[in-house]
Amino acid sequence: MPSPLASLDLSFDSGAARAEVLSRIAAAARAAGRDAADVTLTAVSKQQAWERIAPVLAAGQRVFGENRVQEAEERWAARKAETPGLELRLIGPLQTNKAREAVALFEVIETLDRERLAEALVKAADKEGRLPRLYVQVNTGEEPQKAGIAPLEADAFLEAVRERHGLEIEGLMCIPPEGEAPGPHFALLARIAARNGLTGLSMGMSADFETAIRFGATSVRVGSALFGGRA
Ligand SMILES: *Cc1c(COP(=O)(O)O)cnc(C)c1O
């Protein structure tokens, strides 16, 4: 029987990988004439073994991204109390029937993309007495299988969640289509944010976070470059 650890490359040093990613972020910011302090590293811990996450946490990382509510609860709920400053960000699609759990667990929800969800979040916030910071996800590539509001509907959607639902929005998030140059998608997201008076831009992953920083990313979501490949 192969051990459950057989697929985990134990030689991967995630603590060292974090130092490397942070220095690449700093270099990309410098090259773009930006302050590295204005770019937050979101460590995407989904589907990673705790053995990989612990060294990153020990190195001082406090912002983590998860794409599923239940998995995030299992990984983080008990650890939250003993980890001051922990900031959990939901970066995957959210079902309205999970809104309350998400509002209770996450500091940031990056995937608001429909009014029914805005409604559910307002209700959940009432019950939980807390409201996470919110990002609207934009489907910049207009991919049918991908979540997010279409670029042409983004302005009206932002107005609706702000005016009709009374929600404050911190920024926008996107995931460019695989196999396409990400730059135009990052530029589009930045344009939509600017004309709507939004400063937060969650964009860029392991393969393209330096490009995203060039286009103005204020947070980059990095998984495999930090923790190694997912199971
Ligand atoms: C998994 C995931 C990431 C991280 O991807 P890597 O390529 O491993 O860095 C970033 N953003 C979202 C929305 C994800 O689901």
Image (cartoon, grey):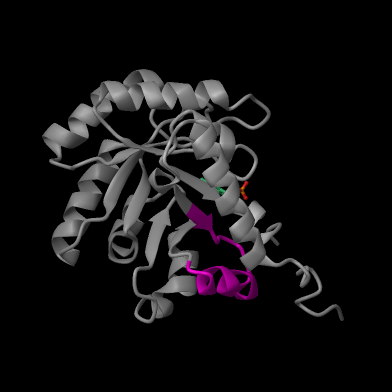
Query: Which residue is at the far right?
Result: 1
Instruction: Name the residue nearer the viewer: 207 or 146.
Output: 207
Residue 114 sits in quarter: top left
Residue 200 occupies which quadrant of the picture?
top left
Question: Going by the picture, which residue comes out furthest to the top?
Answer: 152
Q: Position of residue 23 (x, y in %)?
A: 58, 50
Where 182 sits versus 68, above or below? above
Does residue 116 appear in this view? yes
Q: Which residues are magenta?
A: 42-60
Instruction: Using the image as rendered, state which of residue 58 and residue 78 is in the foreground.
Output: 58
Residue at 19% x, 65% y: name it.
128
The residue under the point 25% across, 25% down is: 196
Q: Is residue 150 visible?
A: no
* Residue 59 magenta-highlighted: yes
Is 142 displayed left or right of 110 in the figure? right
Q: Is the residue 224 above or below the residue 177 in the image?
A: below
Q: Position of residue 108 (x, y in %)?
A: 33, 54
Q: Is residue 60 above or below residue 193?
A: below
Q: Is residue 139 positioned above or below 44 on the image?
A: above
Count all numbered tags in the image, as a single digit. 0
In the image, taking residue 105 as reference, residue 6 lies left or right, namely right
Image quadrant holding the C terminus, namely: bottom right
Query: In percent of the image, x 68 and y 59: which residue is there?
Result: 230
Q: Position of residue 66 (x, y in %)?
A: 48, 58
Q: Residue at x 39, y 50 (%)?
A: 94
x and y, in percent, of residue 154 in the image: 32, 25
Q: Is residue 186 magenta?
A: no
Q: Quadrant of the N terminus?
A: bottom right
